[in-house]
Image (cartoon, rainbow, N blue to C red):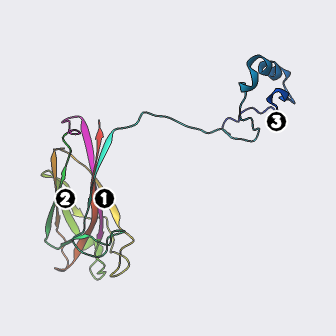
Amino acid sequence: MMPYVSAPYGCYYAFDSRQFQMTTIPQMQEMYQMYGPNFISNVDTNQLQPILTDNPPITSLVLFKELSGFPNYGNPSGNADILYRGNRGVWTFEVPAFFFIPGLLRAQLYIRAVLDDRAATPVPQYSATISINGRVVHRGPVPLEHGRSFGQIFVNWRTLIFDVPDIRRINRIVITNTSTGLANDWIGLDWMEMRFFRR
């Protein structure tokens, strides 16, 4: 179905708006005489009208954390944090006091991650345990790929998203690399962010 098209009447304004002319529907001329030159503005028989909304804005807060422990791989920063097999990392997100209202917020954690570029270890051997404020939100294989291109800034980072089950003023993220491959197999972390929304 075509969207609404304004004024399909074959009309136009001359240089002098009083010379408004109609090619069809004489009643429109009467309306013009009654309401003046503002009756129809921007008349264009071929112009589709916009389809717009003006919904109320949603209050939200995003806490972004760039990770820069190792000087390579991150995209576009060129830096990333690295967790080797058996390593455990901890990161914190503090919610500003003015925004923190217990019971009125919901949040999600976004983690930009990738596997190392050592394709000799099969992807299924990589795994991790991720907890937020002491509650495990992921345990097991990670839906990631080996980083490409080898030894350079990776172009295939993926974003993992988890609901935050227990929001606090200071939120603690713990990730443990539980992979079963070689000791120097690693999981890369480019950035994290927590997005908070009013319920």
Is residue 130 toward the left or the right of residue 78 in the image?
left
Picture coordinates of residue 113, whole percent (x, y): 29, 65
Cα–Cα span, label 2 and label 1: 11 Å
Q: Position of residue 45 (x, y in %)?
A: 77, 38
Mark 3 or mark 1: whose residue is earlier in sequence: 3
Marks 3 and 2 sit apart, C-alpha to C-alpha, by 69 Å
Give how far across and how far down residue 47 sits, in percent: 71, 41
Residue 179 in the magenta stretch? The answer is no
Which quarter of the image is occupied by the N terminus?
Answer: top right
Which element carries disc 3, helix, strand or loop? loop
Q: Dot 1: what SS?
A: strand
Q: Is residue 110 rendered magenta in the image?
A: yes
Count of number-bearing discs: 3
The first of marks 2 and 1 along the sequence is 2
Query: Residue 83 occupies which quadrant of the picture?
Result: bottom left
The answer to whether residue 67 is above or below residue 150 is above
Residue type at numbered disc 2 = Ile
Q: Is residue 182 above or below residue 42?
A: below
Residue that sits furthest to the right in the current view: 23
Q: Which disc, if any, is residue 15?
A: 3
- Residue position for label 1: 160
Q: Which residues are magenta?
A: 98-114
* Discs 2, 1 touching: Cβ within 8 Å: yes
Residue identified by numbered label 2: 130
**Please, what secondary structure does the residue beneath circle 2 have?**
strand
